[in-house]
Image: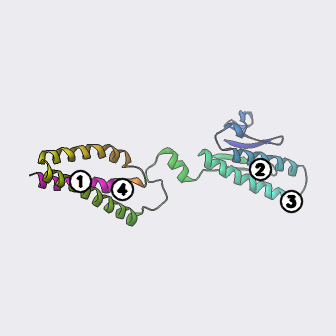
């Protein structure tokens, strides 16, 4: 993709040099603010390229490179930027993490894993689920029937199972899911001890 100026408008062109098809940035899914910034830059660059102000030309060149960098990040593709003042061509690559995230590369996230907080949430969820299931099974076994306690434990496990399965890969929820899963396993050991 190439960032160009036609008249006082910014245009994006595909591969193919000067004969490539040009597209108005507003027609792409890059956000209205970025498209507007590209057009504003093009108007300023057109006005400056007709004058001789050295400071203004360096500002226009720098802003053009910044906008091309934003465009590369939003689109996740390489952008060729031709400076309208000097005519120098620069190739701007998108950040590696953006490309990796769009391609679904595992481990592309740059944030550290919150082990202490996550394990604390997991432990709390495990204790909560285990105590709740054991309280239900114990009360039903004492007050009614051992078989009813077993059936109730199966129903609770079947009810919570799909939610745990769906939440296992969600970044924040997965800690509670892992804890709840461990709580269900521990609770079943207790349920079997109560029933048998």
Marks 3/4: CA distance?
A: 59 Å
Instruction: Name which residue lies at 46% across and 48% down.
Output: 105
Q: Which residues are magenta?
A: 176-196
What is the crowding at mark 1: few (fewer than 14 residues within 10 Å), some, or many (at least 20)? many
Residue 192, can we see it? no
Which residue is label 3 attached to? 54
Q: Could you say whether the residue bearing mark 1 is in a helix, strand or loop?
A: helix
Q: In the image, which disc is placed on residue 83?
A: 2
What is the crowding at mark 4: few (fewer than 14 residues within 10 Å), some, or many (at least 20)? many
Q: Is residue 117 above or below residue 97?
A: below
Q: Could you say whether the residue bearing mark 3 is in a helix, strand or loop?
A: helix
Which residue is label 4 attached to? 176
Residue 119, can we see it? yes
Instruction: Name which residue lies at 66% across and 47% down.
Output: 71
- Pointers 4 and 2 in contact (C-beta within 8 Å): no
Decide which of 5, 122 is in the foreground and name it.
122
Instruction: Name which residue lies at 80% across and 58% down.
Output: 58
Q: Could you say whether the residue bearing mark 4 is in a helix, strand or loop?
A: helix
- Pointers 3 and 1 in contact (C-beta within 8 Å): no
Residue 147 pos. (x, y %): 13, 45
């Amino acid at each position: 993709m190439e960032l160009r100026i036609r008249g006082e408008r910014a245009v994006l062109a595909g591969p193919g040099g000067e004969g490539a098809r040009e597209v108005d940035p507003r027609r792409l899914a890059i956000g209205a603010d970025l498209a507007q910034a590209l057009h504003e830059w093009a108007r300023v660059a057109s006005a400056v390229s007709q004058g001789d102000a050295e400071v203004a030309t360096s500002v226009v060149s720098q802003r053009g490179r910044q906008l091309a960098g934003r465009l590369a990040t939003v689109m996740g593709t390489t952008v060729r930027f031709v400076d309208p003042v000097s005519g120098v061509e620069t190739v701007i690559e998108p950040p590696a993490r953006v490309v990796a995230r769009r391609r679904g590369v595992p481990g592309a996230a740059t944030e550290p894993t919150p082990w202490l907080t996550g394990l604390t949430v997991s432990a709390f969820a495990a204790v909560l689920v285990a105590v709740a299931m054991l309280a239900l099974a114990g009360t039903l076994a004492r007050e009614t029937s051992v078989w009813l306690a077993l059936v109730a434990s199966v129903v609770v496990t079947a009810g919570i199972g799909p939610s745990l399965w769906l939440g296992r890969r969600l970044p924040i929820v997965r800690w509670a899911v892992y804890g709840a899963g461990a709580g269900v396993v521990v609770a079943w050991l207790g349920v079997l001890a109560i029933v048998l």
